[in-house]
Amino acid sequence: MLALIARAAELPDLEQLLLGVVTSNQAARRLYSSLGFVSYGLEREALKIGSRYLDEDLLSLSFAAVERPHRRP
């Protein structure tokens, strides 16, 4: 994840990363939070597995909130 974020931060026009995580996946939610992702919404019943519906937390990481590497001209 750190390598992906670092690579994405090198793209000058990319302003944010978005992802979704099932609300019951606490380990993943803690990981994303520790990397700076914040919740911006909730999609109820976003996924259906068998007869069970799962909600999805929508997360974003703004590159305004992280230090970007210096790019060479």
Image (cartoon, rainbow, N blue to C red):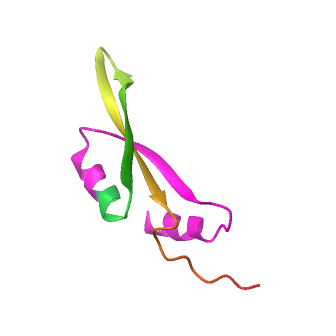
Image quarter where the N terminus lies is bottom left
The correct choice, above or below, for 44 with respect to 61 in the image is above
The correct choice, above or below, for 30 with respect to 40 in the image is below
3 displayed left or right of 29: right
Residue 46 sits in which quadrant? top left
- Magenta stretch: give its range: 1-30
Closer to us: 40 or 44: 40
Image quarter where the C terminus lies is bottom right
Q: Residue drawn 52% across and 71% down?
A: 6
Q: Residue drawn 24% across and 51% down?
A: 27
Residue positioned most to the right:
73
Asked if the magenta segment contains residue 22, the reply would be yes
Q: Residue drawn 38% across and 57% down?
A: 37
Residue 42 rendering spot, x and y as whole percentages: 36, 35
Asked if the magenta segment contains residue 71, the reply would be no
The correct choice, above or below, for 70 with respect to 54 in the image is below
Closer to us: 67 or 28: 67
